[in-house]
Image (tube, rainbow, N blue to C red):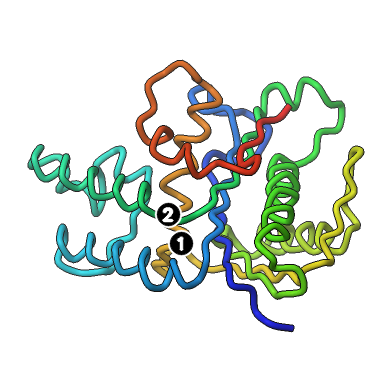
Amino acid sequence: MAFSDFIIFADESGSPVLEGPDPTFPVFVLNCVLVAKVDYAERIVPRMQRLKFDFVGHDQLILHERDIRRQQKDFAFLQVDPIAREAFLERVNAVVADAEIDVIAAVIDKVRHAQKYANPWSPYEIALHFCMETLLSRLRQLGQAGSLIHVIFESRGRKEDAELELHFRRIVANQANWGYRQPDFRVLEWEPVFIDKKSNSSGLQLADLMARPIGLKVLRPLQENRAFDILRPKLAHGGMKSFP
């Protein structure tokens, strides 16, 4: 089977644990970035590398939305020079804005989910199911039926990765369908890959930068959200689902 012309990177924001939700961010967001390999290798990765060289002098910086937002750890330099901070954020926004990608995300309101269902599914499993359905539809539109598509996940630990992989393989084997939709995932071959954030994957960093702004848009839709406004055009093809 031939490799797909595309690759998927998946990252999340918020905890998938239902108990004791964070009152400031009581949602779980799974964000998937679908990108053509040629665009990823020839445009996105070089631009992210150049950004890192320009601002810290090396390419081992890992763009983590939380640390950037809090200006901490490797991004403490953003506190020192307001001009450099604005220039850095503009460059990050430009990388996101110019990236030729599709963004497919699911936002699970954990409080409403726990209240509505007596035995609620894992927020991660629900979010993955929604994202996979949209990804399948989009990949078929892109003529990728019959190919092998890799989905890159950030590793969350051996136990968590094993549980996620089990559910992922159930989905792609058509053994986890629910509701009235019965998509046939077997028109493609799907392969999950779990890697540590320290691997410095440009694709995972891109997915991470977008996940929290998507969750905030669902939580507070009227609040100014510049990061979401930048990525909004990439949410075509039914790219964002909130539940319940």
Residue 119, image x and y in percent? 86, 32
Marks 1/2 in contact by CB < 8 Å: the verdict is yes
Q: Quadrant of residue 87?
A: top left
Tell me: 48 left or right of 211: left
Residue 77's tag is none
Residue at 86%, 64% (x, y): give it. Answer: 173
Q: Quadrant of residue 241?
A: top right
- The residue wearing badge 2 is 206
Local SS, label 1: helix
Toward the top, the furthest residue is 222
Q: Where is the C terminus found, in terms of image quarters? A: top right
Q: Amino acid at mark 2?
A: Leu
Near mark 2 (Cα within 10 A), the count class, few <14, some 14-19 or many ≥20, is many
Residue at 65%, 61% (x, y): give it. Answer: 142
Residue 190, image x and y in percent? 73, 69
Toward the bottom, the furthest residue is 1
Tell me: 154 left or right of 117: left
Local SS, label 2: helix
Q: Amino acid at mark 1?
A: Gly
How many badges with numbers are in the image? 2
- The residue wearing badge 1 is 203
Q: Is residue 184 above or below residue 104?
A: below
